Amino acid sequence: MTRRQLVQLIRERQSFLCVGLDTDPDRIPPHLQQEEDPVFAFNKAIIDATRDLCVAYKPNLAFYEALGAQGWRSLARTVEYIGDTHFVIADAKRGDIGNTSRRYAAAFFEQLACDAVTVAPYMGRDSVSPFLGFEGKWVILLGLTSNPGSADFQLQPLAGGRPLYEHVIRTAMRWAGPDELMFVLGATHPDELAAIRALAPDYFFLVPGVGAQGGSLEAVARAGMNDQCGLLVNSSRGIIHAGSGADFAEKARSAAAALQQQMAAWVQRAFR
């Protein structure tokens, strides 16, 4: 999916919501446990309930890889079911050099046909560049994450006083432009988000941490939005596990709709 297509989706749906498919088999409602593929059955119900309210889905690979071959089948079925109507992010957090990264890129872009993959930057340019150059595909680079451990490295100042995450972002912008590179920036760092927007005015940000992790949608939008929206705000547990009974999909829709309604006003502001 190209940048133009993504922006058009945001305008049409009045939403910049990404639904995280962190599907935990232990939390799938009992009535689905007897299905041949409970993970896919759960994902299908969530997708059907939220398809018109979001622009992206983000399967977290750990929840599928933990199930072995069956998990990969569930993932492939999920991505295929989403189709080309949404921006599909493989939340894999890969990062290795040379041939290894090229094979990761082939797995997510060619085999699974995802639109984007999250990539860890710690090993530098030659671990990221193999993911670049695929038409209509994106690298989403970890910049400043929402977990407490982000203070261990990402927030540490370098010799000139700038934090490490800022050096990562400045350096990565020399590798690729805003048509194929995004940054993961946690919702729990709104002040830093505003500074990063000033540093990278044209780049999209994938922002986790709204909802269960305590981030504020309003604070994120105020700090991070640009004139093409420039944001994909992810909610996982707050949507897919909003309910635990037979009506889980309806509860998921209600949770997604509440976010989308808030987003609509910000989208209108961005494109006015």
Image: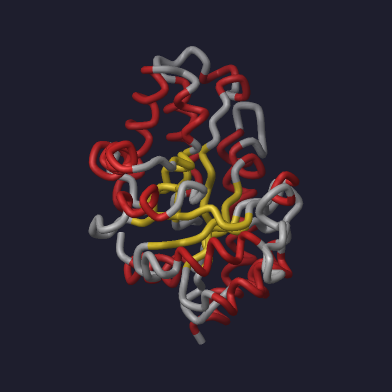
Residue farthest to the front?
A: 159
Q: Residue at x 41, y 19 (%)?
A: 37
Q: With 209 as the anchor, is 233 left or right in this view?
A: left
Q: Nearer the viewer, residue 234 or 173?
A: 173
Measured from the top left, where is residue 113 in percent x and y?
28, 44
Q: Residue at x 44, y 16 (%)?
A: 35
**From where the camera sits, is residue 262 visible?**
yes
Numbered-mark total: 0
Q: Residue at x 68, y 71 (%)?
A: 160
Residue 187 quadrant: bottom right
Measured from the top left, where is residue 47 in percent x and y?
45, 42
Residue farthest to the bottom?
A: 272
Q: With 194 as the anchor, is 4 left or right in this view?
A: left
**From where the camera sits, is residue 47 visible?**
no
Measured from the top left, where is residue 107 in percent x and y?
29, 37
| Quadrant of the snapshot with the N terminus | bottom left
Measured from the top left, where is residue 194 in percent x and y?
66, 74
Q: Nearer the viewer, residue 57 or 175?
A: 175
Seen in the picture, residue 119 relative to 161 is either above or below; the reply is above
Residue farthest to the top?
A: 34
Seen in the picture, residue 97 relative to 257 is either above or below; the reply is above
Q: Residue at x 56, y 76 (%)?
A: 199
